[in-house]
């Protein structure tokens, strides 16, 4: 076997370990992305493929299969591709299901031309090698995404004043200074090791020569620098008792140092949907791939010859057949379809795992107040115990006149409660939460309510949630996850998407899953999963909670 094929084999094995969890539950960068153009082709292999759903997983599968010569048709129920990769722009209409299950329009985006807001994925970590590789191949321009700056703030009711939340730099450095001083006080010997530790703690916590902490310029100056007056060296330190009482660490304060995130990541220039746009343009323009929008699948039947799919498009019931079928349909949606010829184990697995509720609220601000002399925030995230949970500041178009903010991104019960509210009430509620971080939210001229949008992903048609809510402590989830890693119908039906990957909620997971399925189709990977698989922890992977 050639060295090139050896590389393909090693990559395939690494992908298999990552998908099944054998390489660890958080294995996003375990294996290099597969280059399928170097893979051996099996004689007499199937040629026609139906791909159900034009989310990132489905589009990636179409991209890889299309450039290998497969005839692919992508059926997408919405009038747009992308799935949960959605960027809101002026004129976009948002729909959610009402209490009777009927789609109703919730918002028409009225942002100024050129402004946008990522309602789904919004950042790309450096170790998401597949996403970065596809962006390079498809010439999707990237720019830094800033997740944390020392100017970001944290609000905790009863601990931080509503109009004076604590700065990130004060929390981080005052906590470190206090803890370093406490540890230094325990070093009561004069041996060489203790002296080295004392020197480390002086630098680590910015302690004085006596090992005491009295504040640090790391936490900021007490007063602004003036030309004729030397500034007060540091703001008065926050008391350790106040810091401990606030329990700030339970509000994602340390999330940016987790490997899953970083203080700086990447984002596509112009919006996350540039990835979808590039994938769609490439597969339809260069390969034998058709993308049919407004095509809602109603039933799937496995046959001896392959797969038969029924769908409705423009009011007409249609049927398509193919040798293979790759489903990117979210599991809660797939569970509602008529499935014929599938194993009982598969049907049970599809219905077993729900999708997590999650909401976002976004605003156009007519003045980038967060960048003014008082706030001095350029990107990053501020955190609050208000149900909005967090606020994202834009990492693009600095110093321009207007901009957009992610004014809420929440999960679980907070998302369910926010999603129950009428759209106008969501915006009012989110403004109240935003005002606890920035008083400018009380000024409707600065943040007009009519320039806000919201989305409750668990109520979005054809989506019904943010991501598969996998729980590794549930033994039934292990059986279900394993089931989704292997095809049905003697190798004719496959499931893709972040829902069937070790990274639920991330585009890297969707692309990893698509590569895994393509490798199975090509015979590079077995079509049966290992006896034991590691179920991903969806909560930890999307919220950073432990």
Image (cartoon, helix red, strand yellow):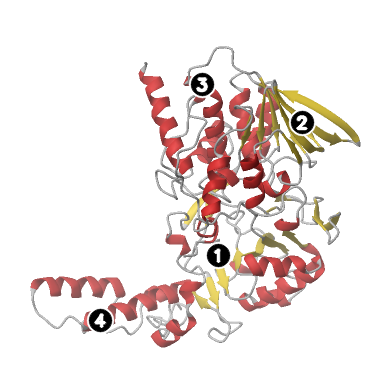
Q: Say which of marks 1 and 4 sits in front.
A: 1
Q: From the viewer's perspective, is 415 left or right of 192?
A: right
Instruction: List x then y, in percent, for residue 227.
Output: 44, 77
Position of 393 relative to 324 (above/below) = below
Q: Is residue 85 visible?
A: no
Q: Say which of marks 4 and 2 sits in front.
A: 2
What is the distance, in whole Å, between disc 2 and disc 1 at their CAs?
A: 44 Å
Position of 141 relative to 367 (above/below) = above
Disc 1 designates what residue? Answer: 381
Q: From the viewer's perspective, is 423 left or right of 63?
A: right
Disc 3 designates what residue? Answer: 37
Report which quarter residue 374 is drawn in.
bottom right
Check disc 4: other Cα within 10 Å, few if <14, some if 14-19, many if 20+: some
What is the distance, in whole Å, between disc 2 and disc 3 at their CAs?
A: 29 Å
Q: Say which of marks 1 and 3 sits in front.
A: 3
Of the image marks 1 and 4, the number of the one nearer the N terminus: 4
**Residue occupying the far front of the picture:** 344
| Secondary structure of the residue carrying numbered label 2 | strand
Disc 4 designates what residue? Answer: 208
């Amino acid at each position: 076997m050639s060295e090139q094929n050896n590389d393909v084999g090693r990559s395939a094995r690494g992908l298999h370990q990552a998908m099944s969890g054998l390489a660890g539950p958080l294995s996003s960068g375990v294996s290099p992305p597969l280059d399928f153009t170097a893979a051996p082709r099996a004689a007499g292999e199937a040629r026609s493929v139906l791909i159900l759903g034009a989310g990132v997983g489905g589009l990636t599968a179409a991209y890889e299969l299309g450039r290998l010569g497969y005839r692919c048709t992508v059926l997408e129920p919405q009038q747009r591709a992308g799935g949960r990769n959605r960027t809101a722009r002026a004129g976009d209409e948002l729909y959610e299901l009402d209490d009777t299950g009927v789609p109703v329009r919730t918002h028409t985006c009225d942002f100024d031309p050129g402004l946008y807001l990522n309602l789904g994925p919004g950042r790309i970590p450096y170790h998401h090698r597949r996403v970065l590789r596809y962006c390079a191949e498809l010439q999707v321009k990237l720019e830094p995404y800033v997740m944390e700056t020392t100017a970001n703030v944290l609000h905790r009711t009863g601990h931080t004043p509503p109009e004076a939340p604590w700065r990130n730099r004060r929390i981080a450095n005052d906590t470190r200074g206090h803890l370093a001083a406490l540890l230094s006080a325990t070093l009561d010997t004069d041996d060489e090791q203790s002296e080295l530790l004392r020197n480390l703690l002086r630098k680590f916590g910015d302690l004085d020569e006596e090992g005491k902490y009295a504040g640090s310029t790391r936490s900021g100056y007490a007063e602004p620098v003036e030309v004729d007056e030397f500034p007060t060296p540091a703001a008065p330190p926050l008391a350790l008792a106040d810091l401990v009482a606030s329990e700030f660490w339970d509000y994602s304060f340390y999330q940016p140092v987790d490997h899953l995130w970083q203080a700086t990541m990447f984002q596509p220039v112009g919006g996350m949907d540039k990835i979808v746009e590039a994938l769609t343009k490439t597969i339809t323009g260069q390969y034998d791939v058709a993308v049919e929008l407004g095509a809602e699948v109603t039933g799937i039947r496995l046959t001896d010859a392959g797969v038969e799919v029924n769908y409705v498009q423009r009011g007409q019931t249609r049927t398509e057949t193919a040798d293979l079928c790759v489903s990117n349909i979210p599991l809660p949606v797939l569970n509602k379809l008529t499935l014929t010829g599938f194993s009982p184990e598969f049907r049970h697995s599809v219905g077993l795992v729900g999708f997590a509720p999650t909401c976002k609220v976004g605003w156009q601000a007519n003045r980038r107040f967060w960048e003014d002399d008082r706030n001095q925030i350029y990107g990053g995230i501020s955190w609050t115990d208000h149900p909005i949970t967090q606020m994202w500041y834009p990492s693009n178009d600095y110093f321009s006149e207007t901009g957009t903010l992610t004014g809420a991104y929440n999960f679980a019960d907070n998302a369910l409660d926010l999603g129950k509210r009428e759209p106008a009430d969501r915006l009012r509620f989110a403004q109240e939460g935003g005002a606890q971080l920035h008083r400018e939210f009380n000024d409707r001229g600065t943040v007009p309510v009519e320039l806000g949008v919201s989305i409750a992903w668990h109520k979005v048609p054809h989506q019904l949630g943010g991501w598969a809510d996998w729980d590794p402590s549930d033994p039934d989830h292990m059986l279900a996850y394993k089931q989704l890693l292997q095809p049905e119908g003697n190798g004719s039906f496959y499931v893709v998407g972040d829902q069937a990957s070790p990274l639920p909620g991330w585009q890297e997971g969707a692309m990893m899953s698509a590569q895994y399925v393509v490798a199975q189709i090509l015979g590079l990977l077995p079509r049966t999963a290992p006896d034991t698989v590691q179920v991903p922890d969806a909560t930890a992977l999307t919220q950073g909670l432990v």
